[in-house]
Amino acid sequence: MGVMPNAVSLFAGCGGFCEGMELSGFDVKVAVEIDPFAAETYRHNFPSVPLFADDIANFLAGGDEHVRRYGLRDVDVVFGGPPCQGYSQIGTRDLKDARNSLYKQFARIVERLQPRMFLMENVPNLLLLNKGHFRDLILRKFADIGYANTIFLTVSAADYGVPQLRERVIFVGIRDSDAVSGSLHELCGGSLSAMRVRRPFTVREAISDLPDAVVASGEVLSYPERGSLSAFQRMMRLDCDGGPYTRKAKRSRAIGKAPIALHNHHTKEILARRLHLISLLKPGQKGDSLPKQVWNGRRPEKWRRLDPDQPSYTILAQMHRDLSEWVHPHLQRWITVREAARLQSFHDGFVFKSSEWQQLKQIGNAVPPLLAHALGKMAMTLLGNIRPRRRGERLRAGDLLQYAAAE
């Protein structure tokens, strides 16, 4: 067996992107994450991956100490998702939001390490904000540092086994000194198309095997009996092999060799008034279905009960403040941390740490592992096609030059 391709994880969060990249065959040399609560979960699940738990601006800042410490002389892939709240449709959408410039830190590290390729994930609204202002800045920035052949793809997590309607944009770039046969966009798109599932998994297929009863934060439950399982549940459960996961791979995370138990199956308390309100919601319905004397007429999405026969709508970090948009399909409660994790395609061996508030935030901010797995397999395909650009061979720039030609 050859040497595993290596990777550097930026904005690692709790580790969803890393989970998928490791599952697809990458050796993550180091992860970078500033949030101490997400870092706690990351360490718990990836004890063998060095974690730089500090501001990304301090990573590779001056000298070669970090390059030597983490073995970063020849990096294959740099990957990560800079915080998206400044671009998000439900976020600030403020051109001056400081988080909007974090792609520059991503680019700084790419420029320093000169990996064979990079993957940068974000929300699709980045492409549209102020008529593509940040889209074009990002493409120009990567062209300036020697990655003019950078393209972007819009992907849906549901296409790759995540039981959730979650749209994302992925920037993919290779060095100017390298080339691939044909179009980078077609190569990446074709690889992803080959991995699409026949149909999306539903909420029922994702969580129906989990117990109705919940526990207090920090406690665990006996692991639920198997019964009749969906293909997705076999992927997630600790007592089954399924999809890209083996039982051994799932047990390699935080659950370890301890007797299997169900972790993180707890949720926020619910006041009597809210309990009455959600009891009136039918599966798949929103606040505008409620009697006028109950609902104030504002924001129908403020109250939503999941439809068991459809994929979930997007799991968001704002769950940590209010779970009223994520009501269980048939029980009179919010979804639990474990149910939210399942809807993001985190298997049951992946254990979330810190407070319940922080756990929900970590899950909502994560790249779904099964989407990350598809991106990792695409990256493997791309690495197998990259070769040094021949003398005199025209640089095949990506979307940046397409935009320039259209202007």
Image (tube, rainbow, N blue to C red):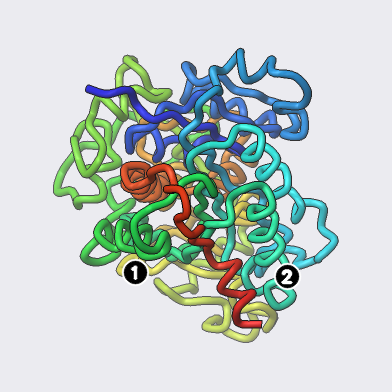
In the image, 374: left or right of 165? Answer: left
248 and 27: which is toward the camera:
27
Where does the C terminus fall, quadrant-wise?
bottom right
Is residue 212 in sight in this rendering?
no
Residues packed near mark 2 inside 10 Å, few (<14), some (14 to 19) or many (20 plus): few
Residue on which the image places disc 2: 133
Tell me whether the residue at label 2 lies in contact with that at label 1, contact meaning CB atoms closer than 8 angstroms: no
Residue at 57% x, 18% y is: 70
Where does the N terminus fall, quadrant-wise?
top left
Horizontal and vertical percent position of residue 236: 30, 41
Q: What residue type is labelled 2?
A: His
In three-dimensional space, the C-alpha distance between marks 2 and 1, rounded to whole angstroms, equals: 34 Å
Residue at 48% x, 38% y is: 77
Residue at 44% x, 41% y is: 214
Q: Is residue 364 above or below residue 39?
A: below
Residue on which the image places disc 1: 310
- Name the secondary structure under disc 1: loop
Residues packed near mark 1 inside 10 Å, few (<14), some (14 to 19) or many (20 plus): some
Is residue 75 in sight in this rendering?
yes
